[in-house]
């Protein structure tokens, strides 16, 4: 579980750096799909990751609108604030948490049950999916997207020995 | 590991069904990013998943070109052929395989080391990333993409009890 989160954090940081080469207008320009712009999609990734970690802990989640975060530095600052708590939760993840149950009340009032393991994987897949969307928009801008490779990033412990 | 693979297989099947509503022309039309068309991207997902599973087992990987698979049924048929071996390998995955080493020779001759665990996660992330690309093309076609949600698919064992 930790390896996937660390992968997402590295890729996200690569995208922030990639975004530094773009104008604010390009970052906010309306695009088809995803959250409708590059920066809003990155904001959404940060929001959703933190919110799931929060609700698993029985805490309130993030409810603020993107309207208050419409530049790259604001999104990075928000990410950095959230990251401490996210990283702490992820690093303390262990196999015993896998099958704990989370009861989620859907907008229509139905209550569904997910395991914590499903929710953690959901959060992981959520980010990778949205990053795939950014890669299309990058090509539409005529730019090379950040690599999505998981191998070659030194994520496995054998490289730290 | 198995849950992510099963997620990818379910989502891929959903996309095949989604593709049934499109003409062959739409499936093969040149698009920006990914593998350049919807069907080529699906073919690439199938190819790459199987090829990693093959090379981990020390077997030859898939070398055929997309040119021979330019319709939806051919790609689904290829996927079904490969799937038996992929599923068997994934279902027999256990924690002891996580840190086995794989020596990969890069195109430039350098040899890099990856753990099997990294490679399996690389294969998982690879598919999710490309599926994110399909979701943008779906919106560009004015169509609703397949859901990328991992929760709500009954992937965790508590639902099977």
Image (spheres, coloured by chain):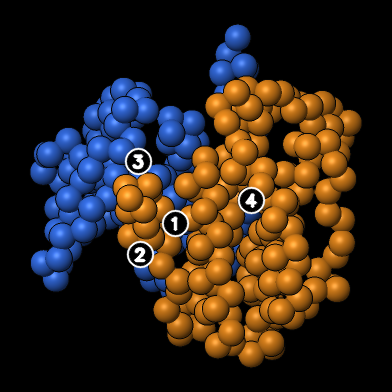
Chain colours: A orange, B blue
Which residue in the protein does label 1 denote?
A: B130
Spatial CA span between label 2 and label 4: 34 Å
Q: Earlier in the sequence, mark 3 or mark 1?
A: 3
Read off the residue under disc 4.
Answer: A87
Q: Earlier in the sequence, mark 1 or mark 2?
A: 2
Chain letter belonging to callout 4: A
What residue is at 15 percent from the left and 60 percent from the top?
B111
User: Which element type, helix, strand or loop, lies under badge 4?
Assistant: helix
- View extreme (top): residue: B161
Seen at 70% across and 64% down, the residue is A79
Q: Secondary structure at mark 1?
A: helix
The subunit letter for the residue under badge 3 reads B
Up-down: is B110 above or below A106? below
B87, A45: nearer the viewer:
A45
Badge 2 density bin: few <14, some 14–19, many ≥20, Cα 10 Å: some
For disc 2, the marked residue is B35
């Amino acid at each position: 579980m930790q390896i996937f989160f660390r992968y997402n954090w590295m890729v996200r940081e690569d995208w922030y750096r990639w975004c530094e080469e773009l104008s604010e207008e390009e970052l906010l320009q309306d695009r088809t799909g995803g959250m409708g712009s590059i920066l809003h999609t990155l904001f959404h990734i940060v929001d959703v990751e933190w919110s799931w970690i929060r609700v698993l802990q029985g805490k309130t989640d993030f409810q603020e609108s993107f309207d208050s975060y419409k530049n790259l530095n604001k999104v990075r600052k928000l990410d950095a604030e959230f990251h401490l708590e996210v990283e702490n939760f992820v690093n303390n993840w262990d196999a015993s948490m896998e099958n704990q149950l989370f009861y989620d009340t859907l907008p229509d009032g139905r209550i569904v049950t997910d395991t914590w393991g499903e929710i953690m994987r959901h959060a992981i897949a959520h980010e990778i999916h949205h990053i795939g969307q950014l890669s299309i928009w990058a090509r539409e801008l005529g730019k090379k997207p950040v690599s999505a490779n998981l191998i070659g990033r030194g994520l496995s412990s054998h490289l730290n020995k």
